[in-house]
Image: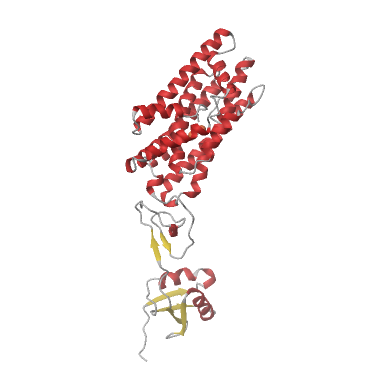
């Protein structure tokens, strides 16, 4: 039998296997082909025994002593584990076998398959995701630090009650805006991490909005206001929408888009600096949520213009489901009127009602504008805006 020569040599000196020698052994074995030999020398008395045991575990073969004392030979028995890679580029379709691996990593084959059902780029992607995410992270604010809670004056009873009622209404809407993206995140393949990141910050934003609106309501004399069945029914239809793009359209474009106008109205008519600050900060966050929705819809509609028909059908379907809901809940309508009028004298109510009518008109105008910028025809945009739930979200 011809003499075999080691392909590589490794001197462990007095390093034992318990002290980290496997790190050096694996590095020395990695470039070897199956059947090639590594010569290991080391001073440790138990090295032969330890090496033999380690080899059995690591898919290598211990061949015994080599030439000279403290010299051992081991042979690489198996090839490297087969690897796949997802590539650094964003794929049109993500492979379930890539699992939770970051995009561009090498992935051992044979891993578990995950049930990510949203694994096509066209189902979830949007332009500008990186800049939306960066802005979101840079503009995070804190309920404790950024709201002038110490500047809350004692307001007239009816104005305070109106603020609390509006805050109650806002909070239930915030919960819906939190739950909708939260439902979809576990379905999105991590290959499209930019989408997951944007939605994750959106959820954090909504949690903060719910926190501050509740806190503002509770700061008043009477605490939280009343929640209407009509509002809950409207939000339920949003929560149950199974398709991601339709949900993003209903929530981010139609609902949160409408809330931009509402929050601007609240900032303008706020009776004290706390409510004005809350409305302003929430508005800044919501503008990003709307931007994501618009960008996602643009991306989808550029590729599948025929989806406009399905989206329109979804708005109409929702409107039919809510047919029994006549309009904005009286709790909210009255509160907005008192807030905008500044009180409950007939003159104040007249002025408040006028302001709320203007609010509705501005909401409708902004919705139609957004729909048209997504390629809906003027008439269709008007019809869809009119179908949109009277409860704003
Ligand atoms: Fe929000
Ligand atoms: Fe939002």
Camera-side residue: 20 or 315? 315
Residue 208 in percent (x, y) is at 55, 34
How many badges with numbers are in the image?
A: 0
Q: Is residue 15 visible?
A: yes
Which of the two residues, 86 or 5, is positioned nearer the viewer here?
A: 86
Depth check: 263 or 13 in front? 263
The quadrant holding residue 153 is top right
From the image, which quarter does the N terminus lie in?
bottom left
Examine the rendered structure and indicate whether residue 283 appears above or below residue 355: below
Q: Residue most toward the right? A: 222
Q: Position of residue 64 (x, y in %)?
A: 47, 84
Q: Residue at x 41, y 27 (%)?
A: 383
Residue at horizontal 49%, vertical 77%? 55
Name above or below for residue 161 compared with residue 255. above
Compared to residue 284, the image places residue 188 above or below, namely below
Seen at 46% across and 80% down, the residue is: 61
In the image, taking residue 173 as reference, residue 34 lies left or right, namely left
Residue 22 coordinates in the image, percent (x, y): 48, 70
Q: Is residue 174 positioned above or below 304 on the image?
A: above
Colouring of the image: secondary structure
Locate residue 292, reporting x and y percent. Answer: 41, 37
Residue 135 visible: no
């Amino acid at each position: 039998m011809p003499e075999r020569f080691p392909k590589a040599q490794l001197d462990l000196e007095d390093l034992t296997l318990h002290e980290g020698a496997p790190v050096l052994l694996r590095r020395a074995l990695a470039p070897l082909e199956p059947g090639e030999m590594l010569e290991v020398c080391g001073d440790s008395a138990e090295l032969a025994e330890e090496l033999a045991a380690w080899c059995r575990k690591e898919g290598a073969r211990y061949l015994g002593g080599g030439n000279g004392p403290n010299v051992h030979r081991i042979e690489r028995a198996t090839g490297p584990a087969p690897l796949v890679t997802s590539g650094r580029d964003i794929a049109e379709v993500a492979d379930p076998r890539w699992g939770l691996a970051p995009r561009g990593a090498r992935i051992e084959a044979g891993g578990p398959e995950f049930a990510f059902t949203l694994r096509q780029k066209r189902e979830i992607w949007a332009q500008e995701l990186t800049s939306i995410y960066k802005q979101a992270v840079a503009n995070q604010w804190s309920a404790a630090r950024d709201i002038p809670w110490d500047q809350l004056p004692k307001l007239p009873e009816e104005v305070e009650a109106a603020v609390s009622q509006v805050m109650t209404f806002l909070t239930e809407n915030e919960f819906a805006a939190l739950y909708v993206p939260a439902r979809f995140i576990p379905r999105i393949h991590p290959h499209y991490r930019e989408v997951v990141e944007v939605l994750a910050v959106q959820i954090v934003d909504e949690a903060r909005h719910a926190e501050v609106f509740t806190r503002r309501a509770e700061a008043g004399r009477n605490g939280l206001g009343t929640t209407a069945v009509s509002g809950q029914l409207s939000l339920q239809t949003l929560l149950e929408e199974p398709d991601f793009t339709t949900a993003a359209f209903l929530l981010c474009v139609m609902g949160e888009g409408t809330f931009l106008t509402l929050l601007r109205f609240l900032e303008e008519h706020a009776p004290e600096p706390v409510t004005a600050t809350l409305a302003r900060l929430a508005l800044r966050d919501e503008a990003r949520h709307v931007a994501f929705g618009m960008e996602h819809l643009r991306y989808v509609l550029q590729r599948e213009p025929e989806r406009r028909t399905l989206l329109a059908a979804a708005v109409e379907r929702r409107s039919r489901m809510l047919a029994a809901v006549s309009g904005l809940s009286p709790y909210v309508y009255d509160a907005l009127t008192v807030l905008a009028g500044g009180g409950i004298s007939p003159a104040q109510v007249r002025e408040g009602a006028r302001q709320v009518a203007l609010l509705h008109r501005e909401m409708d105008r902004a919705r139609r504008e957004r729909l048209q910028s997504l390629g809906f025809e003027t008439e269709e945009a008007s019809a869809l805006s009119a179908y949109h739930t009277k409860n704003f979200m």
